[in-house]
């Protein structure tokens, strides 16, 4: 996948609004591999909806979303499975970790599906993010910021053409945010991938090729 192309895309719930002032909604805009994008959004402007649309589990929008030249509405279940395994990674705002599993088990669950990272690489990520001593803790016992780091490590345990991170540093201190940014830049650079980050305030410190207002 080389591009994610939105054409006049708009959440259906916004359809009756008189005016939409956005760099994304109701525009013709494409995200490209190897580029870094920051989408700044105020609360209630559809940030989480955008994530849901691109990841393909909500379709309550007008307009088109294409992966390259393919309308994502036409993708089969098997095609979505392949895309989510090989082309598109996501860090959800609500994280979606399994609370009964340990931090390491949450990450390994993903890695067992992709066989992308060696165990020593995963351990190095936990170490870099100051989570080595929390690997065997149930995620239910971790703070939200610690869970964010677990979900971030999990998102790197697959090949991807694009990685979508929804408010990835909302509960992180600046030091861990910097480490996360460095790890993300390194992994995305290795894969030649595009990076799309959303924020309603505090955002991941990266070199962004484009900053958009939702």
Image: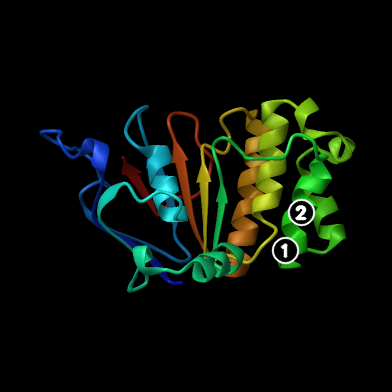
Q: Is residue 185 above or below residue 114?
A: above
Q: Is residue 112 left or right of residue 39?
A: right
- Whether the residues at callouts 1 and 2 have beta carbons within 8 Å, the answer is yes
Front residue of this view, candidates 183 and 164: 164
| Colour basis | rainbow
User: For the residues marked 1 and 2, what is the alpha-carbon distance in whole angstroms?
Assistant: 7 Å
Question: Whole-percent x and y of residue 87?
Answer: 54, 67
Depicted 78 relative to depicted 129: above or below? below
Q: Around disc 2, counting alpha carbons within 10 Å, would you say few (fewer than 14), some (14 to 19), or many (20 or more)?
A: some
Q: Quadrant of residue 169?
A: top right
- Total label count? 2
- Can you give x and y, in whole percent of width and height, for residue 43 in the image? 37, 27
The extreme front residue here reads: 77
Mark 1 lies on residue: 113
- The residue that appears at 65% across and 28% down in the rendered structure is 173
Q: Residue at x 67, y 43 (%)?
A: 151
Q: Vertical placement of 123 versus 82: above or below?
A: above
Q: Which is more toward the observer, 12 or 5?
A: 12
Is residue 121 toward the left or the right of residue 44 in the image? right
The answer, for residue 203, to whether it is visible in the render is yes
Locate residue 30: give its quadrant. bottom left
The residue indicated by pointer 2 is 109
| Secondary structure found at label 2 | helix
Q: Residue at x 42, y 54 (%)?
A: 54
Q: Is residue 127 visible?
A: no
């Amino acid at each position: 996948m080389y591009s994610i192309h939105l054409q006049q895309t708009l959440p259906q719930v916004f359809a009756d609004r008189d005016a939409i002032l956005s760099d994304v909604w109701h525009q013709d805009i494409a995200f490209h591999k190897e580029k870094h994008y920051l989408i700044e959004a105020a609360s209630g402007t559809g940030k989480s909806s955008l994530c849901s649309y691109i990841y393909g589990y909500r379709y309550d929008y007008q307009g088109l979303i294409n992966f390259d030249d393919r309308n994502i509405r036409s993708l089969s279940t098997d095609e979505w499975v392949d895309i989510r395994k090989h082309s598109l990674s996501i860090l959800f705002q609500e994280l979606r970790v399994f609370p009964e599993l340990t931090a390491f088990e949450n990450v390994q669950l993903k890695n067992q599906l992709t066989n992308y990272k060696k165990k020593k690489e995963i351990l190095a990520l936990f170490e870099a993010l100051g989570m080595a001593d929390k690997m065997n803790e149930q995620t239910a016992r971790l703070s939200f910021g610690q869970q964010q780091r677990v979900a971030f490590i999990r998102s790197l345990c697959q090949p991807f053409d694009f990685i979508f991170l929804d408010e990835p540093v909302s509960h992180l201190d600046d030091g861990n945010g910097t480490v996360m940014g460095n790890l993300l830049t390194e992994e995305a650079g290795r894969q030649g991938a595009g990076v799309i980050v959303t924020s309603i305030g505090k955002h991941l410190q990266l070199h962004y090729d484009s900053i958009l207002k939702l």
